[in-house]
Image (spheres, rainbow, N blue to C red):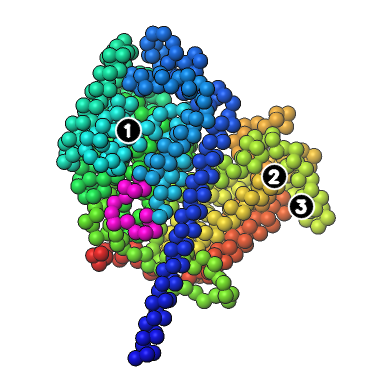
Amino acid sequence: MANAEHGGRGAEVFGATAAGATRARLHLARAGLWLVAAVLAVRQLAVVLSTPRGERLTDLETWVGPHGVLHVEGSLYDSTRFTGTPFAGLVLKPLTRAAEQALGWGWTFGTLLLVVALGLVAARALPRPVGRRTALLAAPVAVSLLMLSLPVRNTLWLGQTSIVPVLLVLLGCLAVRGERAGGLLIGVAAAFQPTVLLFVPLLWFTGRRRAAGTTAVTFAVCTALAWAAMAHDSYTYWVHHMAGVGLGGAADDLANQSLHGALLRLGLNGPLEIALFVALGAVVAVLGLRRAVRYAHDGQLLLAVAITGCAAVAISPTTWQHQLLWVLLAVVGRVGKRASDRYVWPVAVVLVMTLPAKMMLPNMAALYPLRDNVVLLAAVAAATAVPFLSRTSPYFHTPVPTEHAAPVPTRFQHVPLLPFLRRVLTRPNLLLELLLIRVTYAAYSKVRLAATGGTIQGGRVRAEEHGHQIHDIERFLHIDIEHAVNHAVVKVDWLRGFFDFYYESFHFFVPLTVLGVLYWRRPVDYRWARASLGFATLLALVGFWLYPLAPPRLMPALGIIDTVHGVQDFTRPDYGTLTSLTNQYAAMPSLHFGWSLWCGLAIAIIAPKRWMKALGLLHPLFTVSAIVATGNHWVLDAVGGAAVVAAGFGLTYLFQGPRAQTVTAAATVPEREAAKDPAPS
């Protein structure tokens, strides 16, 4: 009995210790996330205030500067520079003198405080019940995402007021007590931004009719007050410009992410465009409000507010970039029955709201309609189509779990360093993979170009110095074969054509094919191979940054013939059109050879038959021959490529452990798992 009693106390002590350690880790993580949010806020403040006056806070300067719109006699709308409502002008006019004196610090710091408040309100409004980890980490994550988002960055840069209506609506719907107080706040928000009136039917159909009435009355009173004080301005805004339509930039500008702007960009205009806009806007508004009411009754009020805001984004005649925060709020919706699919929607929303559209989709004419309207499409999808889960769904709290491969024993005690990155048997979500691959490649391309300061000429001298260094080392090692091989190949037309074709065509085709086959047939090996390729590419970017290197074809004294690109014009600083498109000094290490070696090793390790392994290893052999024969790389560049690939496989082993030994049949696991129903939570 004594032993049992003693054992019970030990278990209790052990449990308390474990719980205390978990709490300590959570608090440490929370402190780290708040530090990240603070760093992002300071960075945004520094970026705005370090920009010369006249290039920052341009909208605010236009309104309240010494010669701003709010100072001039006559109508606010004699020009299109002021796009706010007459009520907004009435509120801002008394602030002109103070704003002139504190233009910059006061406005920017105040906007940052509003962003923090917005993140705190959104984090507290997550649907209940909320786990302890989510409750602790939600607020700093929300603030960080807001700081990174394009609407907030645009608002800070321009000195806009678009944070105010969103914050007022969230406070009115989610924070304040009493329907009248909530309706008052939302009504003031509508006086600043009329499309906020779309929240009136949301309040009405969710049983908050007093709040709906108060919102409408408050909006009417604020508008009437502005009309009494500024009758001519009010007539110009509400009648002549039809609630602001036509103010600001051109309606077909890419910054206008509304249905009206999208239709104009597609070439429609006149009565047909107006009729189509009204019809599509009505459909989006009705569907969005129906879905918002349903999710509000389901207990997901923050999601309901986000859906209504997304509908308002679409139906407004002009929705500029700083007015798009509603789309980011839709990240709180849960989509997908499988645990592995839960990340698709939030990752897609965060990428759309934080990265330029050109990084999301390739620069292809066929994709321009999608690329130019990507935020609008996200808003319309959130308002009308994305199948957010209901809290009554068994998958809301308990998605279909991810199946993992059994860990493989390692020779080293501390491998893997990140044991939570276990090998997953199921295929990753294809849409998410394609999206991340595209974004990663776009970032890779930008870093390559940034390695020379954003211009080719910026790194020319240094890169040529490094080229002479590499050439001297190769001569010392007696491996300076580039000139001899290049001129030998040039003399044989069919061989020159073969190497030119191989250099241009197989660099992307083979790695993508290997990834595609592994994704479909060997999901576990796909994740292992993808991780090693990612590490190798990341290390190569470090090499490009630290050691820009001119390839043999861009070293005039060597007499190397550029068989692929043709003669480069050295009389021009940028060497012609080709070198203005990408960093031609990203030669060390050679990713042409590195990626081909990765393909060869992946095939040699995974392929079941010897002839497949041998065929795979031929690819890096042909590639190294092509890059030397065409004059695009030094021999030592290939050595560097091999080094980063070896390091990539090594880091994958270090972080995740050995490659999991699985069978091809594992590829059918996703279909079997999707058919299963999880146990009710």
Q: Say whether residue 257 is magenta.
A: no
- Amino acid type of disc 3? Ile
Closest to the camera, between mark 3 and mark 2, is 2
Where does residue 241 sit, x and y in percent of width and height? 31, 16
Closest to the camera, between mark 1 and mark 3, is 1
How far apart are the two marked residues, 3 and 2, measured between alpha carbons?
Answer: 21 Å
Q: Is disc 1 in contact with disc 3, using a CB cutoff of under 8 Å?
A: no
Q: Is residue 264 above or below residue 70?
A: below
Where does residue 664 sit, x and y in percent of width and height? 41, 68
Q: Circle 2 sits on which residue?
A: 548
Helix, strand, or loop for circle 3?
loop
Say whether residue 438 is left or right of residue 538. Answer: left
- Amino acid type of disc 2? Pro
Which of disc 2 and disc 1 is earlier in sequence? 1
For residue 326, say whether it is visible: yes
Say whether residue 442 is left or right of residue 145. Answer: right
Q: Nearer the viewer, residue 498 or 536?
A: 536
Q: Circle 1 sits on which residue?
A: 313
Instruction: Give the extent of the magenta segment.
Output: 122-135
Which of disc 3 and disc 1 is earlier in sequence? 1
Q: Is disc 3 in contact with disc 2, using a CB cutoff of under 8 Å?
A: no
Q: Circle 3 sits on which residue?
A: 481
Q: Say whether residue 123 is magenta.
A: yes
Give the class, few, some or many, for how many residues have Cα within 10 Å of label 1's Cα (few <14, many ≥20): many
Name the residue: 21% across, 50% down. 298
How far apart are the two marked residues, 1 and 3, measured between alpha carbons?
Answer: 61 Å
